[in-house]
Amino acid sequence: MEKRRQQLQQLSQEELITSHLLLEDRVRTLEKQVSDLRELLSSKLAKTAQNSSVPPGQSPKGNIEASAPAKRGPKKGHTGRSRARGATDESIACHVGACSCCGTDLAGLVQHEVGRHQVIDIPRVPAIVREVIRYGRYCPTCGSYQRASAPAGFETGRVFGANLAQTVLYLHYAHPLSYKRVQQIVADLYGLSMSEGALVNLVRGAQSALQEAGEGIHQQLQLATVIGCDETGMRVAGSNYWQWVFQTPQLAYFVMDRSRAAQVIANVMGATSPEIWTSDVLSSQMCHPAQAYQICLAHQVRDLQYALDAHSCDWANDMQRLFYEVMVLGKQRESVADYRREVQLMNQRLDRLLAQYPTNEDSQRLWRRFRKHRAALLLFLARSDVPPTNNASEQALRNSVIYRKVTGGFRTDWGAELYANVISILETARRQGQNIFDTLAAILASQPAFSWQGE
């Protein structure tokens, strides 16, 4: 302390005043932080899906009051619309038999049409059992015994056909239902008794075709210019794994891996390098191979909401409002008169906010993050093909989260790998507007299933 005293004695009066004023500012900031922390502890403010990255399923939910049933028919000022009539497969003519007033027979008289409507139904389809009978005989010329080969789809050893296989895949993965429920559906709808082991073997028999299709999606993804990425936890063979998704508007490629590290990204991307990477600010995501990156503004808006709820922070409120406005501006870029000028003004507002130092720790943490990733905050304003959020990646993982809750995970590594290929196919089919059932049929028949144009 004596040494510090001597150092202070050597300072000029102006230097001492400046130092004292800085200390006063620092004390006020610390006092405000202590006050905020005490208030936070007293209120026990919890992080939810609205003010943080906590999953919606882990947020407490209140009761929703029942609303009045919606009125039938079109809204006021709107034209009514009913289901369009389809092609008719069968017509049922209904004639009047007798007069309900006097009993006169009208069946033999000419009658005119008074109305028609359509009723859509589906037939009950029982399972079809086809027996393959193979013949053989000795060749009269050389004496060798010749056996007839079974046609494609009816090979020796096959018990269940391709249509049943794609139905099981569709139910188990696209909607995700457990094997036990698929077993019950197959029994109820088709009258077919199958064990859970038979269902598993049926799925495993499609492994090579699904893997080939998944690798095709992987190769196309490596050619994309803008890629979004995210990950979620998964249980595999009693261990914690991570399911990664790499996606574009037309493609989705999933990977199951033990690691959440950047090496997974390196393995998937190989020697390729996209132009833009879209993700959250996880350290492994920041090791992407892209030339530039856009961080997810939806995550930042939720984190700012927590600073607002906990501290009523004006800086967080202004920053959140700015992010909302720039996301709207990005959507309306084609209709804004002077778009470049608006972008310039938004960047200036962002710089002014980043020049201010907030007074609470939660906002200060975000301030440091935003300054570090300044170039990645508004990159999407310069490119229409770059989204401001990584919501598309989170939405792609939604089915996997449901599957995880339904099944609890995977018992084997091959099951997890097969699921990654299947969900890659299903999500890619959705993004390309294809019929998922038909897509599975094409892949199991080793036929082209996807269009790679525009990637």
Image: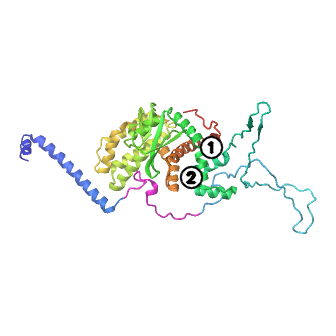
- Whole-percent x and y of residue 36? 28, 56
The secondary structure that dominates the magenta segment is: loop
Residue at mark 1: 440
Q: Is residue 221 part of the magenta span, yes or no? A: no
- The answer to whether mark 1 and mark 2 are in CB contact below 8 A is no
Q: Of residues 414 and 91, which is closer to you in this image?
A: 414
Across the whole image, how many numbered discs are drawn on residues? 2
Residue shown at the point (63%, 60%) measured from the top left: 71
Label 2: which secondary element: loop
Q: Amino acid at mark 2?
A: Pro
| Label 1 or label 2, whichever comes before in sequence order | 2
Position of residue 305 relative to residue 338, above or below, is below
The answer, for residue 342, to whether it is visible in the render is no
Residue at mark 2: 176
What colouring method underlies this structural image?
rainbow
Question: Horizontally, is 150 left or right of 67 in the view?
Answer: right
- Whole-percent x and y of residue 304? 37, 49
**As drawn, which residue projects farthest toward the bottom?**
102
